[in-house]
Image (tube, helix red, strand yellow):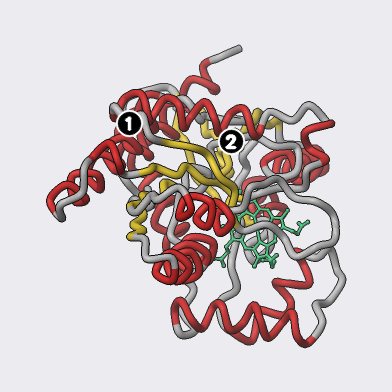
Amino acid sequence: MATKVGVLVMSYGTPESLEQVESYYTHIRRGHPPTPEQLKELKDRYEAVVGGVFPLRANTNHQVATLQETLDTHTKNHDVEFHCYQGLKHAHPFIEDGVAKMAEDGIKDAIGIVLAPHYSIMSVGGYIKRAEAKAEEVGISMKFIQSYHLHPSLIEALTTRVSRKLDQFVEAGAERDKVRVLFSAHSLPEKILQMGDPYQEQLLETSRAVAEKAGVTSWQFTWQSAGRTAEPWLGPDILDTLRTLSQEQVEDILVAPVGFVSDHLEVLYDLDIEAKTIAKELDMRLERIDSLNSDPLYMETMSDVIIKTWEKE
Ligand code: FEC
């Protein structure tokens, strides 16, 4: 009989309705409720994007279902059967709920993976810590995938997206080499640099690998979506980068948010609405590569690292 192995697929999580935004935001703020102004500002962002629909939930559901299918295809006739469970950082079903469900189903061994390719103690590290604690409590032995930012299938999926959009710039009359490619990711507090955190370096490694494969020479890395707190966050922020590039007479921008894998607020609002508005004011053309969502190459990436992690003693 095949061994049943749980796969805890962890993701940021999103509210299910505008009414849930307050409790979601309070959870992100570690139990401190937002001020009425902060709450209104966040609700306005969700409404601007989706009019009350939260795409991240449907996208995560679809990613988990597609990953399950991909794992099934690769493990047909194997002595192992993978069973995917969802665990969200800031919404239901929480990371702890996913681990508890595995235990209820009689799972004894599991692997944890996050729908984010780059490791930081403040992002992926946080997911792992919570899953580890719950797994210990319910007696599941878990292994974790910390990052997969240079997996060849991931790099191929991102490269195809960059090349496709650059072709569209050329069709619209731009010179390929004059389009500035901005690789981006969620900013984190600057203090991670003193902690020797690999996040920035891993993001640069992904950016370099994609730029090289797509034959892009005109590129740079920039941060986005920094939190609204008093401490310094990693910069430059994309909005400042756009202003600087405008002064350098750059007219065409392609944003590749390699730190994210799905369509959600940070992409659909921070890039598609906020950054695009600034670009328009500066008389620049700004486009974004399509999100990975359930791209088969992304599913292959995760399936491959999960199987290899399981096989590794
Ligand atoms: O579409 C959605 O409903 C959810 C979109 C969403 C994703 C996401 C991913 C990351 N975050 C990361 C770090 C931080 C840190 C803080 C923080 C705050 C917020 C707030 C919202 C929010 N994040 Fe997020 N993040 C998403 C949404 N994030 C909303 C609260 C309002 C605001 O500041 O904009 C600051 C709070 C704290 O200290 O915890 C830090 C990182 C990622 C990418 C990796 C991952 O997906 O886990 C890093 C998606």
Query: Quadrant of the image for the N terminus?
Result: top left
x and y percent of residue 99 in the render? 67, 48
Q: Mark 2 CB in 8 Å range of ligand 1? A: yes
- In terms of sequence position, does the residue under pointer 2 or pointer 1 come before the other? 2
Q: Which residue is mark 2?
A: 118
Residue 272 appears in the picture as rendered: no
Q: x, y percentage for residue 258?
A: 47, 42
Left or right relative to 15: residue 290: left
Tell me the residue at 30%/41% (across/down).
Answer: 178
Quarter of the image where the C terminus is located: top right
Which residue, given by chain and number where applicable, does mark 1 sit on? 216
Horizontal and vertical percent for residue 77? Answer: 32, 25
Mark 1: give few (<14), some (14-19) or many (20+) Cα within 10 Å: many
Measured from the top left, where is residue 213 in percent x and y?
A: 31, 25
Q: Residues within 10 Å of mark 2 (few under 14, many from 20)?
A: many
The relative height of residue 140 versus residue 313 in the rendered view (above or below) is below
Work out which residue is located at the far left of the displayed protein and give it. 171
Closer to us: mark 2 or mark 1?
Answer: 1
Tell me the distance, in whole angstroms, between the alpha carbons under discs 2 and 1. Answer: 22 Å
Asked which secondary structure carries label 2, the reply is: loop
Secondary structure found at label 1: loop
- Whether residue 153 is visible, yes or no, is yes
Viewer-proximal residue, 143 or 200?
Answer: 200
Quick one: which residue is furthest to the top in this view? 313
